[in-house]
Image: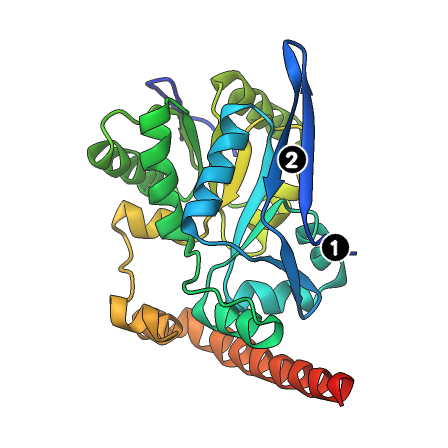
Amino acid sequence: MFRIEGTAMTGTPRPIPDVLDVVVRSADRAPTPISWPPKVALFGIGVSVTDYAEATATILQAARQGLGGVVSCHAVHAIVTASGDASLGVKVNTFELLCPDGQPVRWAVNLLHGTQLSDRVYGPELMLRLCRRAAETGVSVYLYGGDPVVAERLEANLLHLYPKLHIAGCEAPPFRPLQLEEDRAVVERINRSGAGLVFIGLGCPKQDLFAYEHRNSLQAVQVCVGAAFDFHAGVKKMAPRWMQRHGLEWLYRVSQEPGRLWRRYLITNSLFLMKLGMALIRSVVRGS
């Protein structure tokens, strides 16, 4: 299922830099610099040292100027997955913005680099903030991910929250790799829609791979937000605020989907703690 500009249709669409300064040339104006937040290395993955206000402002600036770019929100699972897969790690390290989505990621960055981040940049919350600012500034958005029910509910809920939000298109891709012609059609639809932001909800690492593969063909800023689609569509519940603040969101999600998630969090949380311990030891050795 996909919808573009109010028309419903059926079918089968489907080294780490410290500071990234992107300059994109326009035919009708002088080059405009975008200063993306600096990054620090966490297990070989560049995590952006940023907060909600800076991330939202920078993303919207790029979107309004039609500069493109890739943004992803990485919690423990995503960081461990990328750091354990050399090919994936290289790809995500090209992203303009890699937000510290999980509290443990924020704690680790603060501990290892003294960054003093006061909060994480949670994908679902970032998505809402971007939608609110997009509605206020006239930037249109495109929703790509979920299943047809999730996509339909997500669109309706976002328009209920932000009546002035312009959703240029919404589609749920098939749960299989796209054929070449299907992929080309997706790119054409998104670019033709004029969207400045494309929210991608395909799960990790599928959404990061999609964003990387399309970073040069999509004109909009791609924002990978994972489970935000399910949360804002109302098909899954977010953890209570107190659990989020204390880094226990993983425990809540396991309680909601134990059969699917217990193994993921047992393995990735353990690996995260092991990697963090090793990084701390190396830091002490270097400082001695």
- In this rendering, the answer to whether 183 lies above or below 105 is above
> Can you name the residue that lies furthest to the left here?
160
Question: Mark 2 Cα within 10 Å, few/some/many (few <14, many 20+)?
Answer: some
- In this rendering, the answer to whether 243 lies above or below 221 is below
Front residue (pair 62, 204): 62
- In this rendering, the answer to whether 207 lies above or below 245 is above
Give the residue number, with chain letter if any, for mark 1: 90
Image position, residue 136 (x, y; %): 31, 27
Q: Please, what is the three-letter code of the amino acid marked with disc 2?
A: His
Q: Is residue 248 visible?
A: yes
Q: What's the residue at 39%, 72% (across, down)?
A: 250
Quarter holding the N terminus is: top left
Question: Mark 1 Cα within 10 Å, few/some/many (few <14, many 20+)?
Answer: some
Q: What's the residue at 65%, 36% (across, down)?
A: 215
For mark 1, give the secondary structure: helix
- Residue 28 appears in which quarter of the rendering? top right
- Left or right of 23? Residue 223 is left
For mark 2, give the secondary structure: loop
Front residue (pair 5, 283): 283
Image position, residue 268 (x, y; %): 55, 75
Quarter holding the C terminus is: bottom right
Image position, residue 63 (x, y; %): 51, 29
Q: What's the residue at 60%, 31% (across, down)?
A: 68
- Left or right of 55? Residue 70 is right
Give the residue number, with chain letter if any, for mark 2: 214
Q: Earlier in the sequence, mark 2 or mark 1?
A: 1
Q: What's the residue at 68%, 67% (across, down)?
A: 83
Rounded to the nearest whole Å, what is the CA distance between mark 2 and mark 1? 15 Å
Q: Nearer the viewer, mark 2 or mark 1?
A: 1
Image position, residue 139 (x, y; %): 41, 25
Q: Please, what is the three-letter code of the amino acid marked with disc 1?
A: Val
